[in-house]
Image: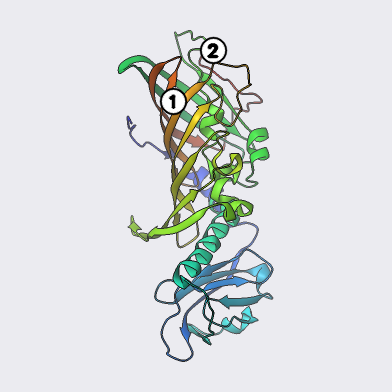
Amino acid sequence: MRKMKLITIFAFGFLISFCSVAQTGSKVAHTIKGMVVSTESNQPVSYTNIGLEGTFYGTASDENGNFTLKVPEDMVDKKIYFSAVGFQSRQFPVNELFDREFNMVKLVAQSYDVGNVDIEAQNMVLIRILRMASENIRYNYGAGPFNLHCSYSKERTKNDSINSATTASVLIYDKTGYSQPGPLDAYENRNYRVTQEGSTYSFSDNMLKLDELLAFDWVRSKSGVLNPALLGDYKLALQSQPTIDGQQFWIIAFKQLLPTLEGSGDFYATSFEGTITIRKDDYAVRSISAKAKAPKNNRMDRSLSVAADNTNYLQNVSYEYTVEYRDLLINQINLSSNYLYHGESFVENTVLQVARAHANNLTVLDSRDYFPGE
């Protein structure tokens, strides 16, 4: 896939306004640090599920039993619970932990006739992490309205020879931004305009399919593994815990054994899997990568079905995509796809790159362009 140079330029005032938005709502009142250990052995209890009762707010102990939990000011009267497979759960008022610099929480061992305890315990933790990432979208990302100035490029190869290359400028207007993430909000409040000087394109040959491309932005639409209601549909695994640019992350692998439209975004997907990278400090999503295969796709959008009498569709489709986030916003989407169309082989590499963003002097858009040109 052809890579484009990363060029994110934000005005200082724009960042300040976004940071203030990210902190509104629930401010942090207390930060609790501690370790979960076994009462009998004093050994750390890894992957303990830790949360505030009646909410999705919480965290998990790491492999050494350590944990950090930031408690919002509107949740200081909640009860906190600690649960881990193989131990009795504990629950008590969260404010009991406020006055101590470091808390030692002890759990009593309890026998269960359960195989693969470590895998089950880890899965509970990964679900908690993904729920927290979903819950914190509105705090970790910028609220609208704002404009994103993007560059678009698509190179298509037909039967191993370059068939076409499309470049365009895309202006996105997002009225609500990430303050109300959801599929309907993203559709109703995010519009775009596409321009390309001195060129004329036909709709059938040069569809940009920006809606399909933007649908990969799961943070904005709160979709896929960022939709708590769908987490039971995925097989999850902790792939690694890297340090990137001095910050610690979880990389969680996900896979749908029986792909669904809701879970993969593809009406005909037969395989779907990927990874999501989440920052430990605040549960912000850094990137999402996935790959899928489908026996066929609608030419307009992979989420649409193909009519029974329609023969004008893509066949033997496979694709991979990566979505990156920086500075409170989406930064780049890369898509590489392979398919057959009327018996001929095609490869497409598409990049949507955010070059500039601003929240002042906005260009308000109330519609979408689906192909380059005025």
Residue found at the very far left of the displayed protein? 160
Answer left or right for 342 relative to 78: left
Q: Residue at x 37, y 36 (%)?
A: 7
Quarter holding the N terminus is top left
Q: Where is residue 351 shown, x and y percent of the image?
A: 41, 30
Q: Which residue is nearer to you in this view: 114 or 93?
A: 114
**Nearest-to-viewer mark from 1 and 2:** 2
Compare residues 175 and 45 and report the one nearer the observer: 45
Viewed as shown, does residue 346 lie left or right of 58? left
Q: Is residue 355 visible?
A: yes
Checking the image for residue 152, the label placed there is 1
Position of residue 123 measured from the top left corner of the image (x, y, whole percent): 50, 64
Which amino acid, by three-letter code, is at mark 2? Phe
User: Mark 1 belongs to which amino acid?
Assistant: Tyr
Residue at mark 1 to residue at mark 2: CA–CA distance: 16 Å
Vertical comparison of 356 with 165: above or below: below
Q: Residue at x 62, y 16 (%)?
A: 309
In percent of width and height, residue 139 lies at 58, 54
In this rendering, position of residue 150 left or right of residue 302: left
Residue 334 seen in this snapshot: no
Q: Which residue occupies the foreground of this view, 275 or 197?
A: 275
The x and y percentages for residue 366 are 66, 26
Q: Quadrant of residue 147?
A: top right
* 253 relative to 144, above or below: below
Question: Please, what secondary structure does the residue beneath circle 2 have?
Answer: loop
The residue that mark 2 highlights is: 203
Q: Determine the secondary structure under disc 1.
A: strand
Number of marks in the rendered image: 2
91 and 25: which is toward the camera:
91
Which residue is painted at 68% across and 68% down in the image?
74
> For residue 237, which quarter of the picture?
bottom left
Nearer-N-terminus badge (1/2): 1
